[in-house]
Image: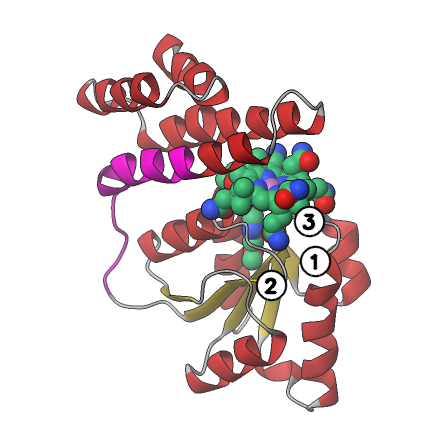
Amino acid sequence: MELIDSIRQAVEALEEDRAEALVKEANEKGLEPLAIVQDGIVAGISAVGKKFEQGQYFVLELEQGGELAQRLVALVEPRLSPGETASKGTIVMATVKGDLHDIGKSLVSLMLSLAGYDVRDMGVDQATMSIISEAQRAQADIIGLSSLMLVSMPVQMELIRYLNDMGIREKFKVIVGGGPTNQGWADHIGADGWAPDAVEAVELVSKLMAKGG
Ligand code: B1M
């Protein structure tokens, strides 16, 4: 676990070469890949966010941290074991309009793919109607919306309102997540579920699919 903590510290300190070397070492030593991601990389980037909040880091460092985290996750990705090959359901995932935060949403998409779902990850800054059109086109079971900022959260609510207005709300389950969201918010906007992280997102999707998609 010392190695994983060193990864967290190297990411927090934005020591790119050291962080990469440590992740490679953790891979070589066969450490649990999910622990490397969650307790090392994700914990490190969360600490970068804290430093930004406290005025110790600026946007440049935020960007550097984001890019570093993505590179590090990519190093671990091949070791996360793939789930069943037959698709258990289709999920359209996106970070909502106005929000450029990609890492958490991509991690959720990755974990869902590994769990055997067909995930259509639309990327970031996606307009509400584009997401709905993609869900219709893909005949998705679930729409997953990520939002990392207070100012972009209302777009999650907007999408559910659009589905209601279009008379197609019952066609899709909608799940939401991202830093400032919580179960209360999900209930408030009429979402079908909320998850705090990628692992619980997989559990949530599995429960919703068991209920009938
Ligand atoms: Co920005 N940023 N950022 N940022 N950034 C935050 C989110 C912030 C909390 C930092 C802070 O102040 N402490 C703050 C938001 C404040 C708020 O509104 N509450 C913030 C800000 C203010 C900004 C800018 C406005 C800064 C500026 O320019 N002045 C700007 C906005 C740009 C925009 O979006 N329009 C901005 C920009 C950026 C970068 C582009 C530089 C970069 C992103 C790079 C990238 O994604 N490619 C960045 C980063 C890296 C962060 C922090 C440091 C890290 C985010 C992250 O990747 N975390 C972040 C601070 C923090 O989160 N502590 C911060 C790791 C990731 C694995 O976790 O994304 O939470 P997370 O995802 C988790 C869960 O939330 C959950 O599972 C994931 C995996 O476990 N989850 C879901 C996420 N989506 C889900 C969906 C689900 C279920 C679960 O179902 C559908």
Amino acid at dot 2: Val
Could you tell me what secondary structure mostly forms the magenta stretch? helix
Please indicate whether residue 125 sits to the left or right of residue 80 in the image: right
Instruction: Residue under label 2, please give it.
Output: 96
What whole-number distance in Å separates the C-alpha atoms at marks 2 and 1?
7 Å
* Mark 2 residue crowding within 10 angstroms, few (<14) / some (14–19) / many (20+): many
**CB atoms of marks 3 and 2 within 8 Å:** no
For the residues marked 3 and 2, what is the alpha-carbon distance in whole angstroms? 10 Å
Q: Is residue 136 visible?
A: yes
Residue at position x 59%, y 73% in the image: 127
Front in this rendered view, residue 173 or 128:
128
Which stretch is magenta? Answer: 67-85
190 left or right of 121 in image: right
Residue beneath disc 1: 152
- Pick whichever of labels 3 and 2 is earlier in the sequence: 2
Residue 76 on the magenta segment = yes
Cβ at disc 1 under 8 Å from ligand 1:
yes
